[in-house]
Amino acid sequence: MHKKTDAQPPEKLTGIQTIDIPKSAVGAKAIKSALAHINDEVGIIKGIGLLKSLNQKNGFDCPGCAWPDPDAKRAFLAEYCENGAKAVAEEATKNKVSPLFFATHSVKELSKLSDYEIGKSGRITHPMYLPEGKDNYEEISWNNAFKIIGNELNALDSPDEAIFYTSGRTSNEAAFLYQLFVRQFGTNNLPDCSNMCHESSGAALSETLGIGKGSVTLDDFNHTDLVIVIGQNPGTNHPRMLTALSETKKKGGKIITINPLPEVGLLNYKDPQNPLKWIGSGQNLTDLFLQIKINGDVALLKVILKLMKEKEDAEPYSVFNHQFIEEKTAGLDILLKDLDNYSINELLPQTGLTLAQIKEATNLIINNEKIIFCWAMGLTQHKNGVDNIREIVNILLLKGSIGKQGAGTCPVRGHSNVQGDRTMGIWEKPLASFLDNLEKEFSFKAPRKHGFDVVDAIEAMHQKKAKVFFGMGGNFISATPDTEFTAEALQNCNLTVQVSTKLNRSHLIHGKKALILPCLGRSEKDFQASGEQFISVENSMGIVHQSHGHLEPCSEKLLSEPAIVAGLANVTLKNSTTNWSKLISNYDLIRNKIEATIPGFQNFNKRVRVKGGFYLPNNARENNFEPTKTGKANFSINKPSEIKLKKNHFLMMTIRTHDQYNTTIYGLNDRYRGVLNERRVIFMNQEDMNYLGIKKLDLVDLISHFNDEKREAKGFLAVPYNIPKQCTATYFPEANVLVPIKSKADISNTPTSKTVIITIHKR
Ligand SMILES: Nc1nc2c(c(=O)[nH]1)N[C@H]1C(S)=C(S)[C@@H](COP(=O)(O)OP(=O)(O)OC[C@H]3O[C@@H](n4cnc5c(=O)[nH]c(N)nc54)[C@H](O)[C@@H]3O)O[C@H]1N2
Ligand SMILES: Nc1nc2c(c(=O)[nH]1)N[C@H]1C(S)=C(S)[C@@H](COP(=O)(O)OP(=O)(O)OC[C@H]3O[C@@H](n4cnc5c(=O)[nH]c(N)nc54)[C@H](O)[C@@H]3O)O[C@H]1N2
Ligand SMILES: [Mo]
C-alpha cells in the first residue's frame, strides 16, 4: 500500500452539517448561490457585467460545460446557470497569486492546503520557475522559460520521451497550433482529459455509427417522444440541459432516468428564468426512475433488448423498424443470437430492479419512435464502459431512432471545448488522412506511431520512459487515477510544465524542475500584433462558434495559449518552415490553416463570424453510416459487468458535488444531496451501515482492492443515503487515490472511476 503524501488532499475534516435534501432544483436558491459566488470572487458590479455577456452571441463562451446555447432567441442576462456563474467567478476572481505570494509560501507549505484553499488563492500573474532543489517558485521571464523547455525537449533521446497533455478548455486555435507543434517536434504523445471522460463514447460511437460525436441537436429535444437520461447528473453538471428537458415535457415527451441516485435536478425543476414559477411545486421531469445498481446498465439494457425481441417474435413488425434495419444496419442476426445466451432471471440481480419496472421502461421504448439517449460519466468510467454505449446504440438501431428529428445519441460532454480539441487533432491516435493533410500544408514529416493516452503516459513516466511533462491546462495530479502512483510518475520527470490560469495541486507535485506558465482565461481580452482577437470553440452538439473575452487580463504578464505555443515552437523547432509568430499575429491565419487541413471548416473565417456559429458535418445525424468499417450502422455484442462482489465488499463511484468544477472546488457544499461544509463523505445504504455497525457520521477508512493490490484513503464520514445496497459514492478528487492505475475500460483505456471495489473500516 502507498503511504499518504502531499499528492492527496489533506485528511482534515471541515465540520459537516446535514440538511434535508431539497425537493426541486434550480429556482431562487440557485440564483442566490450564483450571486453570492460572483459577489465574493469578483464584486457585484463587474460580475453582473460579466454575466451579461456570458453565452450571448457577441459574448464569451461559458468556461463551464459544453451544453449548447439556443440557436435562435437568447435571453438577456439569462443564458447561464448557477454553476456557469460559479465558473466565471472562479476565473474572474480578484485574488492573485503573485511572485510575492510564491516567495512567501514554499511548495511544501502550499501542499498542506486543501484543494479548496489552493484554488481560492487566485489567478497566477507571472511565469514562475522552480529550479532543482529549491523550495519556492521564482519569477522568470517568458524567454527564459521557453529556453528551459526547449533545451530539455531537445536533450531527450527521442521526442516520444515527452508528454503533452491537454484539458478541455483550450480553444480550437490554441489546440490546432499545439498539436502542430507537438507533431513537428516528432511525437503523437497527446493525451487529454477526454481519455478519462468520454473516450468510451467516442470508441463505441465511431465503431457503430461512424462518428465519435453525438447525433442530436438542441432542437431535437422539442420534437422527441422519449428522453432517457442514463449515468448523468445534469442538475449539477449541465444545468441548462434541464431547460431542454423541461421543453420536452411541455411538448408531451416522456423522460426515463437511470441512476443509482435519485438526483434532485432530474426529478423536479424550477425554471430560473421564470421567477413566477419559483413558488409552488416546480415541474416533475422524470416519469420513470430506475434506481440501477452501479455498473448494472448493460444487464438492464440487455433485459430491455430481450423484452423487445420477445414482443417482436410474438407480433412481428410491432417493435423493430425493419426498413431502417435492412437499409442502414449490419449485424442484427449476431445480436439476436447473442441475446439468447442470457436469461432475464440471471441478468435481473445485477440491475437491482424488478422485472415490472423494466417492462414499464421497455413499453415506453416500444411505443415511441423518437428516442434520445443522454449519458455521461455514469456509463463511460467502467471496465465495460464501451459496451454500455454500444448497447444503447443497439436499442436505437432496432427502433430506427437515429438520423431523424427528435431521435439519436447525446453523449453530454464535459469541458467546454473538449470536443473541439479532438476535432483539432488533440489525439494520441490521429487518423492517417489528418496527418497527410498536415504534412502537405506544413511541409514536414509527421510521426505515424500512435502516442500515449493518459494512463499510458503515467505508466511511461513511472518507468522513466518519458521525462518531460507539459500540461496545456488542467490539473493532472488531481484528475488522474491512483494519486500516489501518478505522483511518483510526475516526480520522476526532469521537467514538468503547467500552462494554467489558477494555482492547483499539479504545481506542487512536480518534476526535478518545474514551470508555471500563466495564460489568459476565456473571459479576458486577447490582443495580438494585428489587434484584438477572438477564439472559437465547439460545443457538445458540434456547433462551432466564436468567443470574445470582455475583461482586462488579470495581469500584464499573461500570454494567450496560442502565443505560448508559438513561443515554445520558436525556441524548440530548428527546422520548422512554419512562421509561428505570423500565425499568432492574427488568429484568422490559424483558422485558414484549420480550414486547409480539417474537413467541415470551409470558409471558416466567414462562417465563424456569423452570430451563433455553424454546425460541423455529422454523418449519423444525416442518416449516413458509410464511415464505419461495414459502411453501415453496426449492431454489437456487449458484456454485462463481470464483477462479483464478496460479502463485505462494496462498489464505489467517485462523483462531483454541486460545488466543484472537476478539481476546482468552489465551495464545500453539496446542497442537492443534503451535505454542507464537508467533502470527505461516503454515501451508503442504511442497511449496509447496519450490517457493518456504522452509524451516521461515523469516521471510516476506505481500502480499495484490485487483484492483490490495496490502496487506502483515510478519514471519511458515513452518510446514510438512498442508494442501492452494496453501492457507495465518494467525491472526486479525494477518492482518486483508490482508483487503481491498471483498472481501466476495455478498448477506451478510461480509468474505472465509477467502479472501485472497496472495504469500509470503522475507526
Ligand atoms: N458544475 C460542474 N459542471 C461540470 C463539471 C463539474 O465538475 N462541475 N464537470 C464537467 C465534466 S469534465 C464532465 S465529464 C461532466 C460530468 O457530468 P456527470 O457525468 O453528470 O458527472 P458525475 O458527477 O461524474 O456524475 C455521474 C452520474 O452518474 C451516476 N452513475 C455513477 N455510476 C453509474 C452507473 O454505473 N450507472 C448509471 N446509470 N449511473 C451511474 C452518478 O450517480 C451521477 O449521477 O460535467 C461537466 N460539467
Ligand atoms: N475519480 C475521478 N476522477 C476523474 C473523474 C471522475 O469522475 N472521477 N472525471 C474525469 C473527467 S470527466 C475529466 S474531464 C478530468 C478533468 O481533468 P482536468 O481537465 O485535467 O482537470 P480540471 O480540474 O478541469 O482542470 C482545472 C485547472 O485547469 C486550469 N484552467 C482553467 N481554465 C483554463 C484555461 O482557460 N486555460 C488553461 N491553460 N488552464 C485553465 C486551472 O489552472 C485549473 O486549476 O478528470 C477526470 N478524473
Ligand atoms: Mo470530463
Image (cartoon, helix red, strand yellow):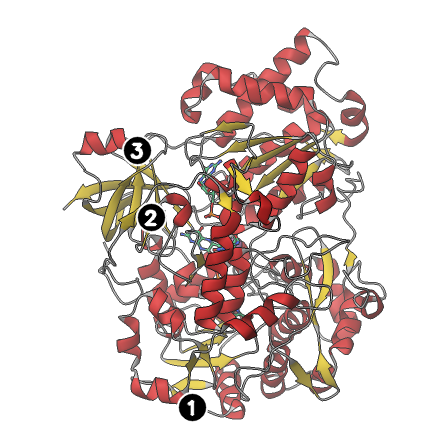
Could you say where residue 677 lies in the image, as x and y percent from the top left? 31, 56
| Residue labelled with disc 3 | 685
Quarter occupied by residue 402: top right
Q: Is residue 135 left or right of residue 532?
A: left
Report whether residue 313 is seen. Answer: yes
Residue beneath the point at 56% across and 28% down: 287
Q: Residue at x 76, y 60 (%)?
A: 612
The 10 Å Cα crowd at callout 3, few under 14, some 14 to 19, many 20 or more, is some
Task: Measuring from the top left, give residue 496's x and y in whole percent.
Answer: 43, 76
Judging by the rendered image, the residue that carries numbered circle 1 is: 139
Residue at the image point whose x is 75% and y is 87% from the top: 530
Q: CA distance from mark 1 to mark 2?
A: 41 Å
Q: Earlier in the sequence, mark 3 or mark 1?
A: 1
Q: Amino acid at mark 2?
A: Val
In the image, is 229 to the left or to the right of 707? Answer: right
Image side of residue 435 versus residue 428, left or right: right
Note whether ligand 1 is within 8 Å of mark 3: no
The residue under label 3 is which amino acid type?
Asn
Mark 3 or mark 1, whichever is nearer to me: 3
The disc labelled 1 sits on which kind of residue? Glu
Nearer the observer, 278 or 18: 278
Badge 2 marks a residue whose secondary structure is strand
Q: CA distance from mark 2 to mark 3?
A: 16 Å
List x then y, in percent, for residue 265: 50, 42
Quarter of the image where one finds residue 137? bottom left
In this view, 123 is above or below 138: above
Location of the N terminus by quadrant is bottom left
What is the crowding at mark 1: few (fewer than 14 residues within 10 Å), some, or many (at least 20)?
many
Compared to residue 637, the image places residue 718 above or below, namely below
Name the disc covering residue 675, or none: 2
Residue 578: tell me if it is visible. Answer: no
Query: Please, which residue is most extreme toward the left here?
Result: 763
